[in-house]
Amino acid sequence: MARWVRGILFVDYVRMLRAHPDRSWEATLTPDDLKWIEPAVDVSAWYPMETFERLGLAVLNTVAAGDLNRVRAWGQGSAAHVLSTMDELVVPGDPRESLMRFQVFRRTFFDFEALVVRHVWDGSAELEVAYGMGAAAEEAAAIQTLGFFVGLIETAGGKGVRGFFSEKSWDDAARTVLNLAWEMPKLA
């Protein structure tokens, strides 16, 4: 069954690959993947998840040189880009409500249950991450997702945001569980 990802996420991988015109992607990407690199990406259109996975691995292995800390930092930085297109997602001063809104908006990013906000409390949350990719791609995407949610919570006013995985599917757990914790913003 085909799975799809929204262009708002797809465009960043394409931009990173285009930023390296000196590299040949033919060894890493299929001919079907390569056809997505040249034309403009429509941020509201749907793109194949299988291509998204291979583009992500190309970015991880070539652009990030396998450094998952860079992937996390990039995910955190990408929150500003995504949130700028969906300003109603962030509730200033309320990270909890912002995460609840993400739960509503998540279908605008993937056409399957890639991310589920399982629990949200004042100061912490638990999400399940299930992109359904190979182990290396799943790990990188989950770490990028951790960075994104740190950026989301910081944008909403959370302080001292921390994130970790209590379960990792790429380490043979049945699922991936992302835990987040933060200090609540001070009320003015």
Image (cartoon, rainbow, N blue to C red):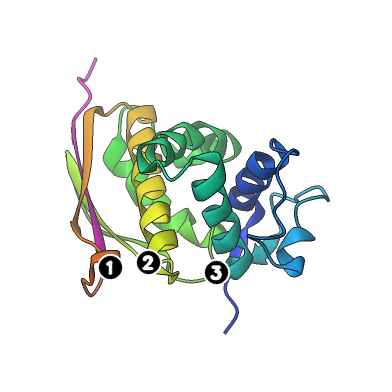
Does 65 sit above or below residue 37? above
Give percent across and percent down for residue 118: 25, 61
Give percent across and percent down for residue 148: 41, 41
Within 10 Å of disc 3 (Cα), the crowding (few <14, some 14-19, many 20+) is some
Give percent across and percent down for residue 88: 50, 39
Q: What amino acid type is highlighted by mark number 3?
A: Asp
**Residue located farthest toward the top when viewing the structure as drawn:** 188
Identified at 21% across, 36% down, the residue is 162
Q: Distance between the residues labelled 2 and 1?
A: 8 Å
Within 10 Å of disc 1 (Cα), the crowding (few <14, some 14-19, many 20+) is some
Quadrant of the image containing the N terminus: bottom right
Q: Do the residues labelled 2 and 1 touch (CB within 8 Å)?
A: yes
Identified at 23% across, 24% down, the residue is 185
Q: Name the residue under label 1.
A: 169
Give the mark toward the camera: 2 or 1.
2
Within 10 Å of disc 2 (Cα), the crowding (few <14, some 14-19, many 20+) is some
Identified at 39% across, 49% down, the residue is 145
What element does badge 1 sit on? helix
Task: Out of 82 and 103, give the one closest to the viewer.
Answer: 82
Region in magenta: 176-188
Quadrant of the image containing the C terminus: top left
- The picture quadrant where one finds residue 72 is top left
Which mark is drawn over residue 111? 3
| Badge count | 3
Which mark is drawn over residue 135? 2
Q: How far apart are marks 3 and 2 (CA)?
A: 21 Å
The numbered mark, 3 or 2, whose residue comes first in the sequence reads 3
